[in-house]
């Protein structure tokens, strides 16, 4: 973090209760959430001990795409669709019926913090569309698979490996 590989893009906090922090990486391949959390949670635990152990900290990935950022901010909610109104800075978020209480959170806390974090007023609604049904195949297709050789016992495998090493290692 000191090197600038990970940046804090936004913080929304309800002191003593919960905080949401949006982070991003400036270096390709660097996981911003993992970097912020630290090995075995060392960094985030240090922050939690400073703020009080009762305060929960959610670390979300910041994204330039606003809809993706809103989805990340509402984590751990499963979001089906985000409808943005950039002029009024409002978004309607459609979630499955069973995710409604998770999206809103205890006392509206999750949606309130996600709203502060993203700068958009978020309206959470249950998706009333037909649930997606898995397609059922009408015909079975038979595929001949290649024959798999019988598995060898551990001793046989070790012996084969040693033979191969001796044969190719010289």
Image: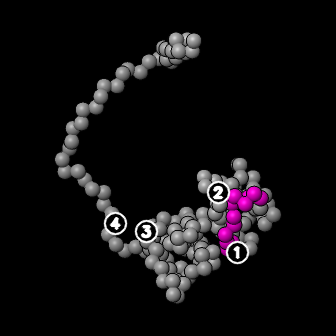
Mark 2 or 4, which is nearer the eye?
2
The residues bearing labels 3 and 1 have C-alpha atoms spaced at a distance of: 27 Å
Magenta region's main secondary structure?
A: strand
Q: In the figure, residue 149 lies in which quadrant?
A: top left
Query: Which residue lies most toward the right here?
Result: 50
C-alpha distance separating marks 2 and 3: 30 Å
Name the residue beneath numbered marker 4: 131
The N terminus: image quadrant: bottom right
Q: Which residues are magenta?
A: 1-14
Dot 2: few (<14), some (14–19), or many (≥20) neighbours within 10 Å? few
Q: Quadrant of the C terminus?
A: top right
The residue positioned 77% from the left and 61% from the top of the image is 47
Mark 1 to mark 4 CA distance (whole Å): 35 Å
- Residue 14's disc number: 1
* Element under disc 3: loop
- Residue tagged 3: 80
């Amino acid at each position: 973090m000191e090197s600038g590989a990970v940046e804090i893009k936004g913080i929304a906090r309800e002191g003593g209760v919960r905080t949401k922090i949006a982070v991003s990486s400036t270096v390709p391949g660097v996981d911003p959430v993992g970097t912020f959390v630290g090995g075995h949670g060392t960094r985030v635990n240090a922050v939690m001990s400073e703020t009080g152990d009762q305060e929960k900290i959610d670390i979300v990935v910041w994204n330039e795409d606003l809809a993706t950022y809103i989805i990340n901010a509402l984590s751990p909610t499963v979001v089906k669709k985000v409808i943005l109104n950039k002029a009024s800075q409002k978004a309607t978020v459609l979630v499955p019926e069973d995710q409604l209480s998770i999206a809103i959170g205890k006392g509206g806390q999750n949606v309130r913090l996600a709203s502060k974090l993203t700068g958009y007023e978020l309206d959470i609604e249950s998706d009333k569309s037909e649930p997606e049904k898995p397609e059922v195949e009408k015909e079975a297709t038979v595929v001949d698979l290649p024959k798999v050789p019988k598995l060898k016992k551990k001793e046989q495998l070790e012996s084969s490996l040693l033979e191969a090493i001796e044969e190719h290692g010289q």
